[in-house]
Image: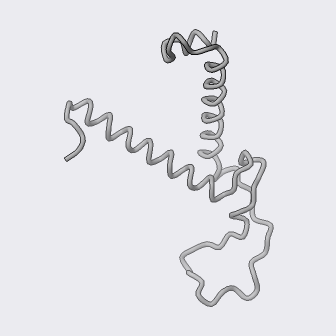
């Protein structure tokens, strides 16, 4: 069943193992995409205390999170920073896709 869905996307020379590998990889990308999207809701509260005293050059507009580099199982083994970066990549891909779709729909080539 799975191989029939992907049959049009592969060359006739590709094996079932290659198709299975790509299906597993697609599933992992989908699962991690969902984890990244809901990471602000599921990320645990930091348990590491702030250093005492805080640095004198501290930016008051930036919230210090000592757990930013700690890996969490609920985030799929990623850190909060990695989830933030993946969220930015997903949002930029979505915005780029919207722009490309709009340009294609209006039959106007993108570029200079």
Q: Measuring 57% from the left and 49% from the top, which residue is drawn there?
A: 86
Seen from the viewer's position, the closer of residues 26 and 57 is 26
| Left or right of 104, for residue 11 | right
Is 79 drawn above or below residue 12 in the view shown? below
Residue at image point 63% right, 59% down: 81
Image quadrant in which the N terminus is located? top right
Q: Position of residue 28 (x, y in %)?
A: 66, 34
Q: Residue furthest front?
A: 13
Q: Is residue 47 left or right of residue 61?
A: right
Residue 79 appears in which quarter of the rendering? bottom right
Residue 24 versus residue 89 in the image, above or below = above
- Residue located at (61% from left, 72% from top): 63
Q: Is residue 58 left or right of residue 51?
A: left
Q: Position of residue 110 (x, y in %)?
A: 24, 40
Locate residue 70 relative to residue 107 in the image: left or right.
Answer: right
* Image quadrant assignment for residue 101: top left
**Residue sitting nearer the eye, 42 or 25:** 25
Which picture quadrant has residue 94?
top left
């Amino acid at each position: 069943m799975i191989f029939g869905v992907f049959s049009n996307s592969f060359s006739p020379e590709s094996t079932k193992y290659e198709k299975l590998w790509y299906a597993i990889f697609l599933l992992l990308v989908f699962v991690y995409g969902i984890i990244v999207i809901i990471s602000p809701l599921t990320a645990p509260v930091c348990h590491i205390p702030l250093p005492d005293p805080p640095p004198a050059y501290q930016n008051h507009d930036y919230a210090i999170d000592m757990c930013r580099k700690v890996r969490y199982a609920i985030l799929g083994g990623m850190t909060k920073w990695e989830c933030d970066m993946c969220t930015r990549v997903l949002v930029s891909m979505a915005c780029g896709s919207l722009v490309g779709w709009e340009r294609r729909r209006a039959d106007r080539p993108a570029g200079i």
